[in-house]
Image: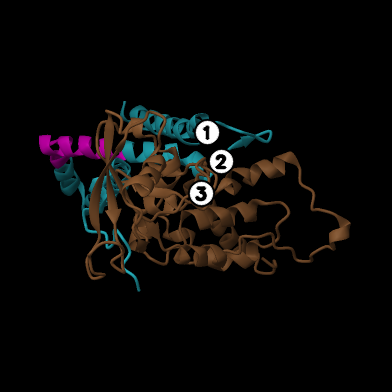
Chain colours: A brown, B cyan
């Protein structure tokens, strides 16, 4: 081990007792690991080192190591981060506290249960909806660069769930659809090729939809892809209000 | 149902993080606005009650505590307004000739400028009639 080390205080929870002598009734604990300190290492490198060298029972999700896959989101010193982009040097020489994303149920160690989110994502129908699907041999739906620019930012989401762990409304209201799913819904509503806004309207305008958001804005701060879910959700609200007035003033209109 | 980590949120949930504290400051300063509106209603009521009641309100308003509270409320309302002006471009992105206007300028154009303009007109009208 090199001279310089850094300590990671890692959240451990093994419902089946894991390799430890703990029973499933035991609550989560923290375990401190001393790992070599390298300036170019990120928290994920340190976790991989722990798993390889110190404790093979440590469980966590990761894949690409380059901020694309969105698997390695965890709380690093209380802030939701992609651990592949959280450099040890930003915390050195302090201890780094690593926890699973907050407001989610924990499956094991640093792995959270994503099922609730996946259900919410599905509820906003995040795909292109056409009134009449045109046959494949007629080619693709064309789009101008400006039309693309109007939603591109919101399409950069990698479903890493950092925004959920940053959102106190998610913590308070389990059914709140949440930042990413709402931003993705708005992404499709803004897409010139999509005609499904009416089908998404019920989910978006529900209390658990955009109106659950109190605009804390922290989702946009922690987003590694600059999606700005907070902005997207406020725009959903604006569209929602416009629709409401349109229906009120023009009840004969079909939307 | 599995227990979600970090829940339930306690009454002091917002103290742990600077961003949450800023959010609460933004929301809480709205109460100052509400207090001032109630105060305005009291002025209206005293107007309806006649000259003596209105005079009493004026005396009350001149009291040092009243001046101090007015200062506090004014500060809170300024803060509250500024936070919302700064957020407006996020809610309503501004486009000129299909180019997005930077948030900084959009906030000035949509929030601060109209606010200063209206305030100037009101001040001008009030001071002219007072002078």
Q: Residue furthest left?
A: B64
Mark 3 falls on what kind of element? loop
| Label 1 chain ID | B
Circle 2 sits on which residue? Answer: B93
Mark 2 falls on what kind of element? loop
| Label 3 chain ID | A
Query: Distance between the Cα atoms at labels 2 and 1?
Result: 8 Å
Task: Quadrant for the C terminus of chain A, please.
Answer: bottom right
Using the rendered view, name the quadrant where residue A248 is placed.
bottom right
Please state the horizontal and vertical placement of residue A251, each as a whole percent of the image.
65, 69
Image side of residue A185 versus residue B114, left or right: right
Circle 1 sits on which residue? Answer: B106
Number of residues whose C-alpha sits closer than 10 Å to that of mark 3, classed few (under 14), some (14–19) or many (20 or more): few
Q: Residue drawn 25% across and 31% down?
A: A93
Disc number at residue B92?
A: none
Image side of residue A240 versus residue B39, left or right: right
Number of residues whose C-alpha sits closer than 10 Å to that of mark 1, classed few (under 14), some (14–19) or many (20 or more): many
Number of residues whose C-alpha sits closer than 10 Å to that of mark 2, classed few (under 14), some (14–19) or many (20 or more): some
Predominant secondary structure in magenta? helix
Q: Which residues are magenta?
A: B59-77
Q: Nearer the viewer, residue B66 or B52?
A: B66
Image side of residue B14 versus residue B83, left or right: left
Q: Nearer the viewer, residue A242 or A221?
A: A221
Query: Distance between the Cα atoms at labels 3 and 2?
Result: 35 Å
């Amino acid at each position: 081990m090199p001279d310089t080390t850094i300590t990671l205080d890692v959240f451990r929870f093994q419902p089946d007792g894991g390799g430890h002598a703990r029973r499933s009734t035991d609550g989560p604990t923290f375990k401190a690991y001393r790992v070599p300190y390298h300036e170019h290492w990120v928290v994920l490198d340190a976790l991989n080192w722990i798993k390889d060298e110190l404790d093979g029972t440590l469980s966590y999700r990761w894949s690409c190591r380059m901020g694309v896959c969105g698997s390695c989101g965890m709380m690093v010193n209380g802030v939701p981060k992609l651990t592949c982009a959280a450099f040890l040097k930003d915390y050195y020489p302090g201890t780094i506290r690593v926890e699973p994303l907050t407001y989610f149920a924990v499956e094991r160690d640093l792995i959270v249960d994503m099922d609730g989110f996946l259900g919410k994502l599905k509820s906003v129908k995040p795909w292109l909806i056409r009134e009449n699907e045109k046959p494949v041999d007629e080619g693709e739906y064309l789009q101008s660069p400006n039309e693309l620019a109007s939603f591109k930012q919101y399409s950069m989401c990698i479903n890493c769930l950092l925004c959920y762990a940053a959102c106190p409304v998610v913590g308070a209201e389990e059914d709140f659809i949440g930042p990413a799913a709402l931003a993705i819904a708005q992404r499709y509503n803004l897409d010139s090729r999509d005609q499904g806004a009416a089908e998404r309207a019920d989910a978006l305008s529900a209390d658990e939809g955009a109106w659950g958001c109190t605009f804390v804005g922290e989702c946009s701060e922690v987003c590694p892809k600059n999606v700005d879910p907070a902005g997207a959700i406020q725009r959903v609200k604006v569209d929602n209000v416009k629709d409401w007035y349109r229906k009120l003033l023009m009840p004969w209109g079909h939307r | 149902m599995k227990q979600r980590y970090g829940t339930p949120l306690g009454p002091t949930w917002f103290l742990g993080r600077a961003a949450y504290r800023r959010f609460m400051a933004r929301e809480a300063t709205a109460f100052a606005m509400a207090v001032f509106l109630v105060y305005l209603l009291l002025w209206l009521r005293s107007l309806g009650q006649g000259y003596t009641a209105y005079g009493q309100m004026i005396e009350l308003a001149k009291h040092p505590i009243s001046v101090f509270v007015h200062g506090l409320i004014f500060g809170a309302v300024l803060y509250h307004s500024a936070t919302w002006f700064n957020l407006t471009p996020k809610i309503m992105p501004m486009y000129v000739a299909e180019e997005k206007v930077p948030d900084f300028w959009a906030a000035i154009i949509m929030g601060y400028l109209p606010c200063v303009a209206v305030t100037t007109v009101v001040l001008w009208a009030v001071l002219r009639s007072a002078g």
